[in-house]
Image (cartoon, grey):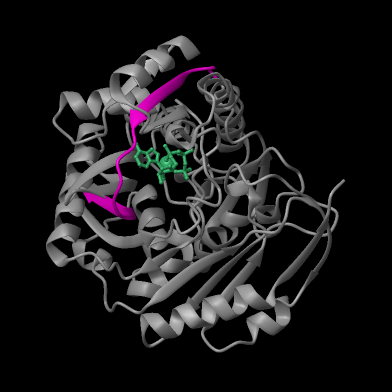
């Protein structure tokens, strides 16, 4: 595999670990991104300027590179929700990848849920919304415990819980603004523990080394929005529940037509039963695939995804956790406004148990109001011999980091 060429779609900050991993594997790495300043470009051997979301532009740039400069042998995305771009490039160049039809389903929450319900994969009750009046009607029929969301956005943008007294017209309009196709849907809110899973399908069987309890301690603080404050690994759920989640994820992967490929699940365990909120056909963002899984299990998940993309064999053993080391991830949420100063990072990094701190905003940047994951300024990863040790380290780091903002 050494010396072969891998195209990584996205050069954002969350892609940098994966780009570095591909380089370590001896690959010639081409990165595509719209932003000429993308941090991943600094690690890449070659650069293509094309928006990650622009399927046509990325495909054209990849074909041109493949024809004129160097043969491309594999394509993946990291840190960007663009499976359609990846599947289209793979199809155009005859490379390994998931079907374009699977990628399409994975980026349309409505089509995905229709497919899941048709094939018996458990999902919350859902419906398409054409207007705020539609939403009023559902509220009358089903009561207020509903979630409104754009059909095709990400990062929690426009996802709102309605039992918070929010005006349905406003909720509908906010969700619609976040949808590139201006489509909105509603779902029943299912309470219960939420988990993130990261699996690889090998000939229709899911192997799931990534299993994290999502931390929603700020559900009330950020209501009506859902903003995750990191996660805990290994999971606290009983073994049999974890098993049921993994089986549901496998059924969901198959339902989308993904026999070989990696999938990221957002699952809620409601009254003991797993339901799929979403299944993404790509590597997770937020450092789950690149950092948390390797720290927690010793599994080189990104390496496995790269190998599969290059047409190499990945085995169940490659995906089997070697250990379960406690890992805690937490975020820093500053007051909204323009950042004046960030202090305490180095001190926090020196604390025992701190594996990594990634600062995503800089002085001069604007911290938006907490309506999506964009409101986070820094990410902390901590480990320890026990969960309590790792948690104490993460909390100590959060307390040390001071992000001073001023209202513009
Ligand atoms: N029906 C539901 N029941 C319970 N919680 C839900 C439901 N729908 C969404 N949520 C919560 O809101 C979060 C964001 O929703 P969703 O995954 O649909 O949006 P997203 O924009 O894809 O966000 P992300 O990129 O964080 O996955 C979910 O991870 C979950 O915590
Ligand atoms: Mg999601």
| Quadrant of residue 69 within the rendered picture | top right
Residue 38: % across, % down: 71, 49
For the point 57% across and 22% down, which residue is it?
180
Q: In terms of depth relative to the viewer, which is nearer, 210 or 404?
A: 404
**Residue 321 drawn at (x, y percent):** 26, 71
Query: Can residue 120 be spotted in the picture?
Result: yes
Answer whether residue 183 is magenta in the image: yes
Q: Relative to the observer, which residue lies in front, 21 or 165? A: 165
Q: Residue at x 54, y 17 (%)?
A: 182
Stretch of the chain drawn in magenta: 181-202
Q: Is residue 131 magenta?
A: no
Q: Is residue 22 above or below residue 78?
A: below
x 27%, y 33%: residue: 124
Residue 131 seen by the camera: no
| Nearer-the-camera pick, 371 or 1 | 371
Quadrant observed for ligand 1 in the rendered image = top left
């Amino acid at each position: 595999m050494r010396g072969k060429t891998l195209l990584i779609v996205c050069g954002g900050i969350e892609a940098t670990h994966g780009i570095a991993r591909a380089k370590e594997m001896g690959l010639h790495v081409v990165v595509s991104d719209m932003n000429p300043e993308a941090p991943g470009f600094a690690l890449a051997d070659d650069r293509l300027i094309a928006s990650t979301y622009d399927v046509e532009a990325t495909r054209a740039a990849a074909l041109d590179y493949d024809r004129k400069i160097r043969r491309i042998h594999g394509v993946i995305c990291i840190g960007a929700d663009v499976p359609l771009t990846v599947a289209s490039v793979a199809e155009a160049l005859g490379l390994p990848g998931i079907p374009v039809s699977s990628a399409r389903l994975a980026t349309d929450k409505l089509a995905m849920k229709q497919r899941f319900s048709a094939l018996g994969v458990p999902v919350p009750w859902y419906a398409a919304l054409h207007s705020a009046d539609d939403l009023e009607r559902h509220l009358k029929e089903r009561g207020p415990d509903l979630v409104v969301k754009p059909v095709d956005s990400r990062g929690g943008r426009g996802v709102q819980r309605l039992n918070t007294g929010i005006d349905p017209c406003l909720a509908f309009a906010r969700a619609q603004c976040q949808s590139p196709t201006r489509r909105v849907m509603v779902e029943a809110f299912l309470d219960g523990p939420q988990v993130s899973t990261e699996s690889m399908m090998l000939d229709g069987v899911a192997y799931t080394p990534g299993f994290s309890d999502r931390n929603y301690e700020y559900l009330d603080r950020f209501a009506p929005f859902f903003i995750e404050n990191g996660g805990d690994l290994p999971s606290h759920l009983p073994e049999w529940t974890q098993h049921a989640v993994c089986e549901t994820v496998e059924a969901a992967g198959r339902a989308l037509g993904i026999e070989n490929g990696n999938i990221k699940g957002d699952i809620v365990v409601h009254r003991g039963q797993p339901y799929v909120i979403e299944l993404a056909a790509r590597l997770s963002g937020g450092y789950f695939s690149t950092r948390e899984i390797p720290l927690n299990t010793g599994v080189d998940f990104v390496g496995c995804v790269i190998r599969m993309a290059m047409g190499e064999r990945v085995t169940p053993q490659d995906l089997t956790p070697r250990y379960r080391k406690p890992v805690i991830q937490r975020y820093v949420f500053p007051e909204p406004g323009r950042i004046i100063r960030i202090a305490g990072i180095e001190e926090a990094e020196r604390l025992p148990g701190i594996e990594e701190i990634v600062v995503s905003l800089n002085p001069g940047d604007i911290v938006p109001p907490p309506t999506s994951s964009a409101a986070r300024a820094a990410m902390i990863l901590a480990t320890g011999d026990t969960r309590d040790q790792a948690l104490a380290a993460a909390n100590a780091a959060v307390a040390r980091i001071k992000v001073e903002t001023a209202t513009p």
